[in-house]
Image (tube, rainbow, N blue to C red):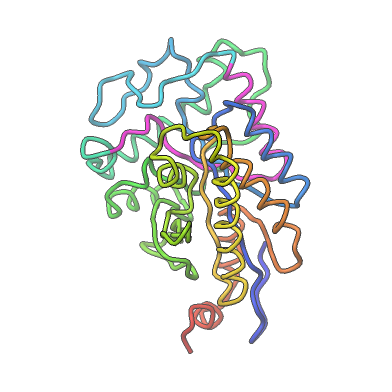
Amino acid sequence: MRCSLADGERPPQFVVISFDGAGVGNGWFRAFRESAARNRATLTFFLSGVYLLPSDHRRLYRPPGHRRGSSDIGFQRPARMRLQARELTAAWNAGHEIGTHFNGHFCGSRGVNSWSAADWRSEIRQFHRFVTDWRRNSGLTHLPDLPFRVREAIRGGRTPCLQGDRQAMFRAFRSYGWRYDASGTGVAAWPRKRAGLWQFPLPGIDVGGRQVLAMDYNLYAVQSGARPGPRRLRDRWERQAGRAYERAVERSLRTDRAPVFIGHHFASWNGGIYQRALLGLMDRVCTRQEVRCVSFEQLADWLDAQTPATLARLRGRT
């Protein structure tokens, strides 16, 4: 996707949709793959490595600062790993990006916030091993392997709970040749590099007059306190979520066309309303002439193809 802009030319409106964890629960992985095919979209799936590590091999995982074999999101059953590998294979073969959401999803002061660069490197090495050795660890050696080499395929990620010491993280990420980090929060703006990595932060979007992070969990927290809400309100909440996403795209289209970033999980919070809102958004915007629904790596490709003068212009500087 290396297409440099001519002087004065307006950029496309990039929309980047990504999924944390990228597990196979509830059939959402397949639903979004099918929507992407229908709408000419490319997605980023941030895989949690423990979703390719069976429970009976949990002690292979040595999480920094935590008990060996522990994980705040559990591990996987071999039968589910078969489906996980199938979905990852289909996604990769369709041109989608596989990134990392690391492994055990440890948040808070005793979680990734306390990790050193060496801790992050350990976590990344273990992610590589779990993804590479999934057939041997699960006993499913008769199945085909994944169609990518994980060390070369992973070019960026999103940390658990968007946390972590940036200086330590970025030292580790650069040592693996990564191109970007998607762990931050911020405002809708043209991306910049920090420590050699493109920064792709989740922005705030307007939801009923409140600024809410553009992520399904945050909508869930605002609308129903991160607990299942009354069924009678769910249709209204779904429309509200869809409108919030679409307004963010429309606002950027009318102004500087800064990329719009949306993060989700494959969860069915409030009966799946946030997933349906996002699927509806893809149907409405991804095939529009001015819009490109792309992966993070594709956006990094495009940004790297621009001249410094073009990037300065996009950021509003002369």
Q: Is residue 150 left or right of residue 276?
A: left
Asked which quadrant contains residue 290, the reply is: bottom right
Who's the residue at 46% across and 51% down the image? 178
Q: What span is in magenta?
A: 80-107
Residue at x 66%, y 52% (from the top left corner): 281
Side of 296 relative to 208 (left or right)? right
- Residue displayed at 55% across by 50% down: 241
Where residue 63 sits, quadrant-wise, is top left
Viewer-nearest residue: 249 or 18: 249
Q: Nearer the viewer, residue 315 or 186?
A: 186
**Nearer to us in this view, 153 or 282:** 282
Q: Residue at x 47, y 55 (%)?
A: 180
Provide residue 137's location: percent of width, then percent of height. 50, 15
Verify whether residue 311 appears in magenta.
no
- The percent coordinates of residue 45 (x first, y second) are 56, 41
> Does the magenta-highlighted stretch encompass residue 89?
yes
How many numbered discs?
Answer: 0
Say which quadrant the N terminus sits in: bottom right
Task: In this rendered view, identify the residue nearer to me: 238 or 177.
Answer: 238
Please determine whether, in this image, residue 91 is positioned above or below residue 285. above
Looking at the image, residue 215 lies above or below residue 78? below
Percent of width and height locating residue 306:
58, 74
Q: Residue furthest front?
A: 232
Q: Is residue 121 above or below residue 303?
A: above
Which residue is most to the bottom? 318
